[in-house]
Amino acid sequence: MNPTEAKRESQRAQSNRQELVERIAQALPADGWLDPFSGFRLARSSQPTEPTRAIYQPALCFVAQGCKQALLGEEVFQYDPGTYLIFTVDLPLTFQVKKASKELPYLGLRLNLDPALVASVMMESGVEAKKADATMKAVAVGTTNADLLDAILRLVRLIDTPGADKVLAPLIIREIVFRLLMEGEGARLSHLLAAGADTRRIAQAIGYLREHFDQPLRIDDIAHEFGMSVSSFHHHFKSVTAMSPLQFQKHLRLQEARRLMLGEDMDAASAGFRVGYEDPAYFSRDYKKLFGAPPQRDIAKLRNNLEL
């Protein structure tokens, strides 16, 4: 790219970022979130937030203004208006807005990645992508180029257009996936297809752990069930999720226990027992380690925040 073209691209990107900020701010005049289309969420916050933990399905996350970070196990992924976050398997992530103010609120979006759509784009585009590699991490931060930013902006422009979610949005979402392929995300996106044998097994194992998180974890049995040695299963599972199977299960259990206490008014001992803990003290210790406070204090704080 010659200097003239580079300058033009830079100006286009700057203009698009400014418009994106204006459109999200207009759609969300106050803190909160909005789902213009299925699988597409806009968010706003006028101050840094407390960590939010949940199991998230594969998605592309983008910041128009401010800064946000995601934690997976001990790894930190920070992204801002010049970058995007992508993750391609169901993961227990912790999100937190790091930079925001009333004058310059955090403005961002999340677009879920549908496996069928990704498969269609990969097949029809003819873009060569490596087969899914079970050692490739399922979450990463990438640099947002002008073409990807342009497609994201055009998707946001549709939120005020009646019927656009059924006619135009699918076309732009396909383009976004195509742009990600062009940026070298093909191997990571292949996790959604579970094309490789090892990747398919790890994807199936993640699904199994999600469905049976409250049951005792027998690594030997699970590895055998999916046709892998124990050492290979451990290695590939941690490569993709950045956690051991035991850590992954623990995150699932504790997040479900938190939901039970907050949403169903269940006491800590009962919630711990429901998700598979036999020792209340052990449950309380793990809970404090993940959420930063014992169950009773954490739930009280969450409820107080909801009332504000």
Image: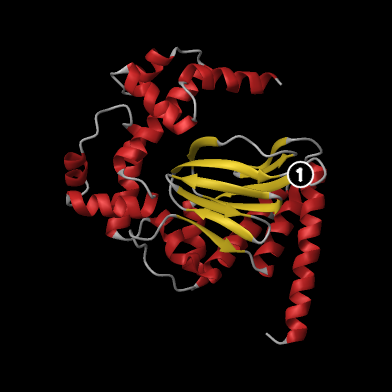
Q: Can residue 223 be seen in this view?
A: yes
Residue 115 placement, left or right of 272: right
Q: Can residue 171 be seen in this view?
A: no
Residue at 80% from the left image edge and 50% from the top image edge: 23
Residue 240 placement, left or right of 107: left
Quadrant, the C terminus: top right
The residue at which mark 1 appears reads as: 105
Q: Which amino acid type corresponds to the residue marked 1 in the rendered image? A: Pro
Residue sitting at the far bottom = 2
Decide: is 46 above or below 16: above
Q: How far across and down, in percent of the image, does residue 5 sit? A: 74, 82
Q: Residues within 10 Å of mark 1 (few under 14, many from 20)?
A: many
Q: How far across and down, in percent of the image, does residue 184 sit? A: 50, 69
Quadrant, the N terminus: bottom right
Q: Quadrant of residue 268?
A: top left
Q: Nearer the viewer, residue 126 or 82?
A: 82
Residue 217 placement, left or right of 207: left
Q: How far across and down, in percent of the image, does residue 112 sit? A: 56, 48
Q: In what element is the residue under mark 1?
A: loop
Q: Which of 237 and 67 is in front in this view?
A: 67
Residue at 44% from the left image edge and 61% from the top image edge: 188
Decide: is 16 above or below 159: below
Q: Nearer the viewer, residue 122 or 138?
A: 138
Residue at 66% from the left image edge and 61% from the top image edge: 82
Residue at 72% from the left image edge and 41% from the top image edge: 44
Decide: is 291 above or below 304: below
Q: How far across and down, in percent of the image, does residue 287 sit? A: 42, 27
Q: Quadrant of residue 97?
A: top right
Residue 164 placement, left or right of 258: right
